[in-house]
Image: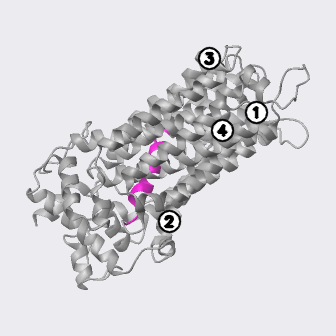
Amino acid sequence: MGFTLRKPEGEAGEAGPAIMIGLFVAFGGILYGYDTGTINGILEMEHFKETFSNGHVDADGKPFITSSDTSLIVSILSVGTFIGALMASPLADSVGRRWGLIWSCAVFNLGVALQVAATEQKLLIAGRAIAGFGVGLVSAIVPLYQSETAPKWIRGSIVGSYQWAITFGLLLASCANQGTHNRSDSGSYRIPLAIQFAWSIILTVGMFILPETPRYLIKKDSQELAIKSLCRLRKLPENHEAIHAEISEMQANHDYETSLGNATYLDCFKGNMIKRLFTGCAMQALQQLSGINFIIYYGTYFFTRVGLKNAFIITLITNIVNIVATVPGLWLVEKAGRRNLLLGGAIGMCVADYIVSIVAVAATGDAPNIILIVFVCVFIAFFAASWGPVAWVVTGEIFPLKVRAKALSMTTATNWLLNFALSYSTPYLVESGPGNANLGSKVFFIWGSFNLLAIIFVYFFVYETKGLSLEQVDEMYHTIRSARKSKSFIPAENYRKELHAGNIDDKGGKHQHVENSNSRGADIESVKSA
């Protein structure tokens, strides 16, 4: 296994344009990361508490936002994102992936404007809900756009860059909060909120320039436009055989799917789609239940309450760890593969969470807080290099074109549904006082247990999709019954054309897959040359 990611020998065209386009579209992750990151620090800003406390004060007579108000302010974003993720499918299938992102940014800007203008909770909450709707649309359409435009040999890294952009947004939010939290006027929270306009405008302008995805154009029976789009992505002339081969594979796959009838949401629950949908939804749910959003949403809030000094600086450090550790994950997803990376990440997160909780229970003095900081950073590093990017990669790869937008909207909605549940319940879990669980650092026992469940889930349900085209991933699900054997899958030539002609069935039939321990990439090349 070489150290660098190289384009396979014999792969026609240039990968540069598709890679640059995919990385730019990942900019949508900054909207997601920055929006969730700003509230982390804003909740602890004095002027924000004075403005939005609704008259509540703490024991020292200082303005205080109650646990219930904090939960609503933070979690209402996830209500909007949940609805937005579900609406992403009809939007992306009707106006396209490209225009879908443009409209999503417009909705997001409206929500940001309301938040900046707010001087009382109701308008602030409305703004966060509308901004969340825009973020939900973006969070489902960006991985869809990336997976449909990226070359298969580096698709995992490109789709994973969406998570890297999220971490970069979190870091930018932390920097903005650090720069304004000592201000004594409304600029302390309005400036970080208003900066969000910049990220949305950049993405909008870029999407006016970038092409629509060729697979969407095939879906709309616009093969000529699909060829032009693919030529732009691969930097090849329209008459190049590689262009026609890739378009033919997309068209054959689409023709077979449309021969089965128009897709509805019910199709996501038929045949092996149930397994794929369960895999995608469980992947997104376990990503949230890992404990990462506890740090993202409530890091500064939590560090302050367990007695740590310089909570804003500690949050900044955790965000730096997040963004740095994501980079090796973008390399490992194509080198180690999806399954290995997810298993290793879940093990690392599980151990780190249990160490934090056990020390919190057993130790006294300053030791628990030191261990807390160190192993929170260890936890974040494992998450950032594995479950952070790879959850988006896997869910973007496992569904066929016919139901891809619909299925992705449901998996992304699952992410946001758990996001809402956790962001709303967390203050009640960690706070002391009547009606609260007062778990403090012991809440990491919960996150560690979910990461233990994640290890089991990956072993039995996650297929290895490294090095396969999206059409070949679909073929693998039809021919390989066990995720544990997925690494041995070798795609057949003209599978969809043969299937459409009735020469093979979609349950294994006459199709033979090779089960051995050789490199999948080498085996695919041997099949092509056979």
Disc assigned to residue 277? 2
Disc assigned to residue 180? 3
Q: Is residue 323 left or right of residue 428?
A: left
- Count residues near mark 4 (Cα–Cα under 10 Å), then give few for <14, some for 14-19, many for 20+: many
- Count residues near mark 1 (Cα–Cα under 10 Å), then give few for <14, some for 14-19, many for 20+: few
| Residue 307 visible in the picture | yes
Of the numbered discs 4 and 2, the one sitting upstream in the chain is 2
Task: Please name the amino acid that badge 3 sits on.
Answer: Thr
Q: Residue drawn 59% across and 55% down?
A: 83
- Nearer the observer: mark 4 or 3; the answer is 3
Residue 96, compared with residue 335, is above or below; it is below
Question: Residue 302's x, y, as percent?
Answer: 72, 30
Task: Please name the amino acid that badge 1 sits on.
Answer: Glu
Range drawn in magenta = 384-400
Residue 12, compared with residue 486, is above or below; it is above
Tally of numbered discs: 4
Disc 2 versus disc 1: distance between alpha carbons?
41 Å
**Callout 4: helix, strand or loop?**
helix
**Callout 3: helix, strand or loop?**
helix
Q: Is residue 270 left or right of residue 20?
A: right
Q: Is residue 391 magenta?
A: yes
